[in-house]
Image (cartoon, rainbow, N blue to C red):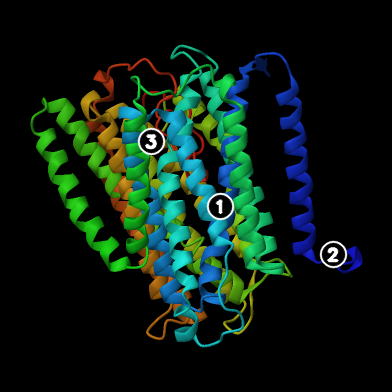
């Protein structure tokens, strides 16, 4: 334990996060010991889900903040390779919920899917804490260590576990309330606060331990967090009032058969996470197949419904552009922060907490802003909001490049510009992610609702892979990141994205007409998109939809 007089900024941030986590746990204990079935006007089951998801996000985002640094500093991959592995892994995390959600809806039920996913995730995080040979400086020798197979296995477990847990736990939140219950909006607000509190605290504490004490300490804490979340969820089963159970009686043989499918998929992911080219080919082939199937279904629909499918395709196509830039945060921007930013003693991974903290602060403001503009009759259309989102994420990189170049290429980049790039990316995110989730559920025909939501997350997965390819490019031919090349790439992608944004804003009136909002039937759910939202840090700010 360091003497308090020697603490630097990173130590103080870690201590504050630890105290904050303790305060959150005390509040949870107070809720757990109450005999009332409600707390703060909501079912106790909501807070069971709040704490379970908080710990899951604690572990997931904590591990994510360390991953690219771990790849470069422990496994000795060059910067380009590490970014590509990071992007491939994240893309798989966003694809597998399609399978997990389907199995839960059809047979398993959300609660059993969450328990299975939680067990698999906990195992994955625990295996991440296993390290191989120490003190090796030759990458070829290091990566020949048999322990690296354990690392790939750990990533595969996390991918599959996320697939079973990611969307299913948020679906149970909606099941606690009737469709007409006025508390649904505030319930998802409370839930998403848990998501982002977990993401922020996990990033800080897991990142701090991993970078200052040892990688296994950080990953071990992430694993402990996941186990705590799973325990809370299982003990809190009575508070869920029977929600999330299988849609029909489930035979034990069938149930274990579904778990076997999940276990077998770990083997598939173990192969894919090591071979990013295979992931790229699968994304391309599957993407073309999904597009052709969507068009096939669209041309069987009447004109208005068909036009809405075209609007959906337009919005979905922008996903890889936005997330390809946004997800530099955990990849190339994380490495840049570690190498070239004046951090004042703060470990680079801790800066990953800025986004969820901004989300907690700004999410409610944006939700209120859209409602206020809607009442004034001047709320931008969904495609226009996408355009504004792209402008902001593009501008974030241009501001960052300007800040880095303003002090000279030989000087460290002022930390202020790290806060600014995350601020602009978060405000952009709040213009795109919740709006997109709402648009998918509003515009899709009933018989294609789940497929369209799957396509949304699928294209988000494509964006994650694009992020890996952009990050790989920052390594240049040698694979080692340079400040000059990284800033040149950031400048280029910033200007290209703003150009795309201008084009999106130019055609947004046409896309809005395709949406036919004036004839859109009310689906009876005041919280559009909430049930389908994975409620990530990237999915905050879901709010009652106002026609625009």
Taking the image as shown, residue 1 lies to the left or right of residue 270, namely: right
> What residue is rendered at 61% in x and 29% in y?
235
In the picture, the quarter occupied by the C terminus is: top left
Q: How far, Cα to Cα, is label 3 from label 1?
A: 21 Å
Mark 2 surroundings within 10 Å by alpha-carbon count, few (fewer than 14), some (14 through 19), many (20 or more) = few
Query: Regarding mark 2 in the picture, which secondary structure is present there?
Result: loop
In the depicted view, which residue is nearer to us: 249 or 187? 249
Query: Regarding mark 1 in the picture, which secondary structure is present there?
Result: helix
Where is mark 3, residue-wise? 437
Earlier residue among tags 2 and 1: 2
> What residue is rendered at 44% in x and 61% in y?
153
Q: Report x, y in % for residue 133.
A: 57, 78
Q: Report if residue 358 is visible in the image.
A: no
Q: Quadrant of residue 337?
A: bottom right
Mark 1 surroundings within 10 Å by alpha-carbon count, few (fewer than 14), some (14 through 19), many (20 or more) = many
Q: Which of marks 3 and 2 is in front?
A: 2
Mark 3 surroundings within 10 Å by alpha-carbon count, few (fewer than 14), some (14 through 19), many (20 or more) = many
Taking the image as shown, residue 140 lies to the left or right of residue 419, namely: left
Can you say whether 292 is above or below 250 in the image?
below
Q: Report x, y in % for residue 256.
A: 37, 36
Tag shown at residue 157: none
Q: Report if residue 41 is visible in the image.
A: yes
Tag shown at residue 61: 1
Q: How far, Cα to Cα, is label 3 from label 2?
A: 46 Å
Q: In which quarter of the image is residue 420?
A: bottom right
In the depicted view, which residue is nearer to us: 182 or 126? 126
Where is mark 2, residue-wise? 1
In the depicted view, which residue is nearer to us: 167 or 403? 167
Q: Report x, y in % for residue 315.
A: 29, 43
Taking the image as shown, residue 340 lies to the left or right of residue 290, namely: right
């Amino acid at each position: 334990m360091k003497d308090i007089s020697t603490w630097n900024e990173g130590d103080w941030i870690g201590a504050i996060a630890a105290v904050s986590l303790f305060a959150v746990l005390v509040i949870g204990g107070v809720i757990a010991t109450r005999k009332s079935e409600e707390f703060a006007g909501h079912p106790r089951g909501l807070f069971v889900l709040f704490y379970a998801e908080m710990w899951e996000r604690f572990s997931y985002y904590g591990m994510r903040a360390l991953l690219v640094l771990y790849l470069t500093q422990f496994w000795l991959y060059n910067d380009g390779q590490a970014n590509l592995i990071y992007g491939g892994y994240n893309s798989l995390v966003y694809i597998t919920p399609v399978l997990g959600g389907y199995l839960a809806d059809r047979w398993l039920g959300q609660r059993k899917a969450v328990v299975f996913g939680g067990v698999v995730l906990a195992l994955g995080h625990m295996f991440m804490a296993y390290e191989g040979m120490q003190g090796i400086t030759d990458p070829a020798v290091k990566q020949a260590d048999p322990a690296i197979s354990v690392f790939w296995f750990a990533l595969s477990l996390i991918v599959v576990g996320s697939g079973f847990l990611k969307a299913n736990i948020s679906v149970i939140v909606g099941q606690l309330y009737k469709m007409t219950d006025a508390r649904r909006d505030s319930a998802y607000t409370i839930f998403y606060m848990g998501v982002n509190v977990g993401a922020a605290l996990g990033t800080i504490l897991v990142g701090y331990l991993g970078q200052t004490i040892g990688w296994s300490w950080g990953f071990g804490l992430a694993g402990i967090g996941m186990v705590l979340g799973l325990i809370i969820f299982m003990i809190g089963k009575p508070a869920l009032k029977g929600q999330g159970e299988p849609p029909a009686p489930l035979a034990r043989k069938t149930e274990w058969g579904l778990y076997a499918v999940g276990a077998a998929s770990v083997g598939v992911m173990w192969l894919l996470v090591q071979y990013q080219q295979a992931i790229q080919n699968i994304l391309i082939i599957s993407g073309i197949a999904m597009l052709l199937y969507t068009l096939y279904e669209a041309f069987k629909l009447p004109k208005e419904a068909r036009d809405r499918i075209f609007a959906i395709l337009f919005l979905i196509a922008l996903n890889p552009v936005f997330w390809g830039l946004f997800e530099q945060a955990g990849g190339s921007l994380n490495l840049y922060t570690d190498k070239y930013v004046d951090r004042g003693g703060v470990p680079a991974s801790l800066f990953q907490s800025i986004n969820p903290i901004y989300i907690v602060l700004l999410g409610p403001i944006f939700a209120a802003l859209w409602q206020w503009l809607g009442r004034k009759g001047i709320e931008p259309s969904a495609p226009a909001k996408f355009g504004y989102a792209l402008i902001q994420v593009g501008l974030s990189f241009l501001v960052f490049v300007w800040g880095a170049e303003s002090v000279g290429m030989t000087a460290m980049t002022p930390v202020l510009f790290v806060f600014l790039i995350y601020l602009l990316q978060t405000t952009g995110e709040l213009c795109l992610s919740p709006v997109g989730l709402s648009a998918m559920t509003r515009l899709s025909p009933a018989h294609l609702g789940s497929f369209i939501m799957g396509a949304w997350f699928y294209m988000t997965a494509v964006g994650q892979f694009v992020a890996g390819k952009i990050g790989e490019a920052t390594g240049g031919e040698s694979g080692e990141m340079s400040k000059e090349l990284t800033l040149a790439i950031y400048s280029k992608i910033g200007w290209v994205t703003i150009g795309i944004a201008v084009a999106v804003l130019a055609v947004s009136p046409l896309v809005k007409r395709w949406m036919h909002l004036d004839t859109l039937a009310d689906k009876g759910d005041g919280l559009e998109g909430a049930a389908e939202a994975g409620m990530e840090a990237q999915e905050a700010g879901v709010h009652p939809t106002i026609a625009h």
